[in-house]
């Protein structure tokens, strides 16, 4: 599956209509809000995984990144963050990650996550701002287990479940 990652733009609108996922809010966000949040509201940026097979282009999945902060007290159980000052910790939020249901089970979720993490680490290393955490809100238990494979820690037991990854060990490599 030859995939390319592209920033969502107006020229992608036709691709969005065919996207399917078992979590309807992820589909609705992509179709109704993602472009507005990027262009008008400046709240988030969405990246599309475009599958181009024999000239037939389709949307395989997407992820959305935004900024966030996490209250210091919320991460008190994470030892590596215990020595940080008592104010909110800056973060990049993986606000959404979804794979078209027709393509699930092929490693695309991992690919999208690694792309999102790569962009985040690139920004952390050379961007104009500093942040310590990569954050997401797992939609259900399956999503939480997916993120735990990448060493995310749960901050709650109910869903959506806020989860965090301390980026410092990755940046120190």
Image (tube, helix red, strand yellow):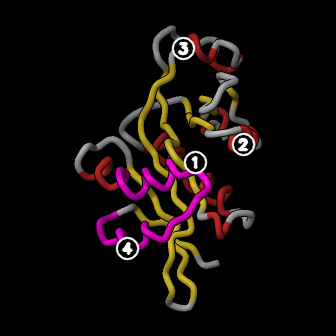
SS category of the residue bearing label 2 = loop
Marks 3 and 2 sit apart, C-alpha to C-alpha, by 22 Å
Q: Please state if 45 lies on the left or on the right of 103 as rendered.
A: left
Looking at marks 3 and 2 on the same chain, the residue that comes earlier in the sequence is marked by 3
Q: Which residue is mark 3?
A: 72
Q: Is residue 10 magenta?
A: yes
Separation (CA) of disc 4 from disc 3: 42 Å
- Whether residue 3 is situated above or below residue 160 in the rendered picture: below
Residue at the disc numbered 2 = 150
The crowding category of the residue bearing disc 1, from other C-alpha atoms within 10 Å (few below 14, some 14 to 19, many at least 20), is: some
- Secondary structure beneath label 3: helix
Q: Which residue is mark 1?
A: 117
Which residue sits furthest top?
86
Q: Is residue 72 above or below residue 143?
A: above
Q: Which residues are magenta?
A: 9-34
Which tag, 3 or 1, sits closer to the chain's start? 3
Task: Quickly name the residue at label 4.
Answer: 14
Of labels 2 and 1, earlier in sequence is: 1
């Amino acid at each position: 599956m030859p995939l390319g990652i592209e920033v969502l733009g107006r020229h992608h609108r036709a691709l969005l209509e065919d996207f399917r996922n078992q979590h309807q809010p992820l589909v609705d966000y992509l179709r109704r809000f993602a472009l507005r949040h990027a262009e008008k509201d400046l709240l988030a940026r969405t990246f599309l995984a475009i599958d181009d097979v024999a000239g037939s282009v389709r949307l395989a999945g997407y992820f959305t990144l935004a900024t966030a902060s996490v209250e210091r007290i919320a991460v008190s159980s994470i030892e590596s963050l215990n020595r940080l000052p008592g104010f909110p910790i800056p973060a990049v939020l993986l606000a959404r990650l979804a794979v078209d249901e027709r393509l699930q089970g092929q490693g695309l979720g991992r690919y999208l996550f690694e792309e999102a993490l790569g962009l985040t680490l690139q920004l952390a290393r050379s961007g104009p701002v500093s942040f310590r955490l990569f954050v997401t809100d797992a939609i259900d238990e399956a999503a939480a287990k997916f993120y735990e494979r990448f060493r995310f820690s749960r901050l709650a037991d109910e869903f959506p479940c806020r989860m965090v990854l301390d980026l410092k060990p990755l940046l120190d490599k």
